[in-house]
Amino acid sequence: MHEFIDNDDGYTVWLKDHPSGFVLNVRRNPGASYAVLHRALCQTIAKPRDDGAYTGRGYRKVVANAVDDLRSYTRTLGGTNASFSLVCSKCDPLGG
């Protein structure tokens, strides 16, 4: 598991190197109310954008090869369980 803050270049390299991985999109100051799970190839978090659009501004990315690692991370956000606030409906990371 790795966290990217103000490092869009490193984040996009990770996406290319881990196409079957998972991404948790969280706010800059993360909390349990916003933790959105995506597949690494999801175009909502992987298509080319302006510098800082992914890991700058108001967001950071937590990445892992296994969903369970990101579930564990959500426990550190202060929620009552290890859960995501949303699961992307476009890439369906918990589906087949």
Image (cartoon, rainbow, N blue to C red):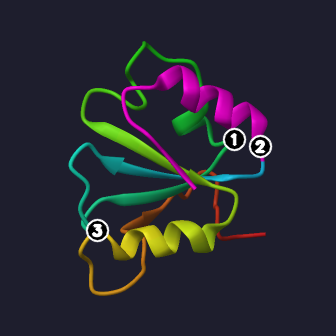
Foreground disc of the pair 3, 2:
3
Instruction: Give above or below for 61 relative to 76.
Output: above
Quarter occupied by the C terminus? bottom right
- The residue at which mark 3 appears reads as 77
The Cα–Cα distance between marks 1 and 2, rounded to whole angstroms, is 6 Å
Q: Which of the pair 57/94 is nearer the observer? A: 57
Residue projecting furthest to the front:
2
Q: Residue 40, image x and y in percent?
A: 65, 45
> Between disc 1 and disc 2, whose residue precedes?
2
For badge 1, the amino acid type reads Leu
Q: Secondary structure at mark 2?
A: loop
The Cα–Cα distance between marks 3 and 1, rounded to whole angstroms, is 25 Å
Instruction: Give above or below for 34 relative to 52.
Output: below
Q: Residue 27, image x and y in percent?
A: 28, 47
- The residue at which mark 1 appears reads as 41
**Residue at the location (57% across, 18% down)?**
48
Q: Which mark is residue 19?
A: 2
**Residue at the location (70% across, 58% down)?**
65
Q: Residue 36, image x and y in percent?
A: 43, 57
